[in-house]
Image: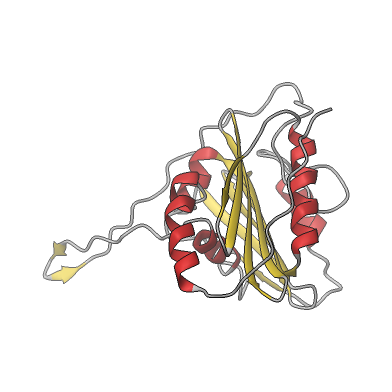
Amino acid sequence: MRRTFGLIGLAMILAGCQASEAVAPESSGQATQNIATVGGPISRRLENRDPNEIGLKVRPGPAITVYSSADDAFRIFHDPKVVGFESDDLPPTFQPPLYSARTWEEDTLHMGFGEILYNRELVAAIYEEDKANQQRLNELVNDHQDQVGSLQPRTLTGKHVSYWFWDKDDRRLMICGYFTGHDVVKITVAVGDRRVMDGLDMSVEKATKDEYQIDRSFTIQRPTPAPVASGGN
């Protein structure tokens, strides 16, 4: 995908996401990069379905959760009749052959979707809209809050970027709204195994650091996000 990884690359930037620093020790007179790599996921496959399991739900149909069918999840977004771009590029901290990736971008819809797989199992899913607005962001936050029931998010609200993080067991859901001006919001929704999300730098700790940097980088003004309705069944 030309934009995604791109998609994961941008999500990493928005979520406090910086690539791991490369160390270049001397080896046979040449510098060799050693990049810290992400270990295997720590989430277990659920034996019984949890009705409030953390998942990504931005289109009709079942939510995409950790260990959902990767093929079914990809088909929700990939329309072979629509002009788009597909890629299997991995972020540098995820190493094959155990880790693999699949991404899809549709220019006409200004959206992208990406999956991170471990042993061919879905361990993270990332969705992005480039041309959304405040209303769409509020809808997605409220829809995901309803899905997870009484579990409340950790919220970070800056002048130009806002984050919502829900953590449950070893799974994490993140929504990021990046305000680019004139009520245009770039939205990223991601769900995954906690270790994998940490590897993508989609964590409260990284978001807290980057929120300040992003707010310093822009002078645009945006409306204050509407309150998020409490979830519950």
Say left or right for 78 vs 194. Answer: right
Please tell me which residue lies in front, 189 or 66. 189
* Residue 150 appears in the picture as rendered: yes
- Compared to residue 101, the image places residue 182 above or below, namely below
Relative to 157, does residue 232 appear above or below in the rendering? above
Residue 185 position in % (x across, y down): 69, 67
Image quadrant holding the C terminus, namely top right
**Residue at 67% in and 38% down:** 67
In the shown orientation, is residue 94 left or right of residue 115?
left
Residue drawn 78% across the image and 45% down it: 142
Direction left: furthest residue:
29
Residue nearest the viewer, comparing 135 with 72: 135
Q: Residue 82, how many percent across, how many down?
A: 83, 74
Q: Residue at x 42, y 60 (%)?
A: 18
Image point (59%, 51%), residue name? 163
Expressed as whole percent of the image width and height from the top left, the position of residue 59 reads 84, 53
On-image quarter of the N terminus: bottom right
Q: Position of residue 140 (x, y in %)?
A: 77, 51
102 lies above or below 169 = below
Query: Would residue 17 be visible to someone looking at this image?
Result: no
In the rendered image, which quarter is residue 28 located in? Answer: bottom left
* Quadrant in the rendering for residue 145: top right
Left or right: where 216 falls relative to 219 = left
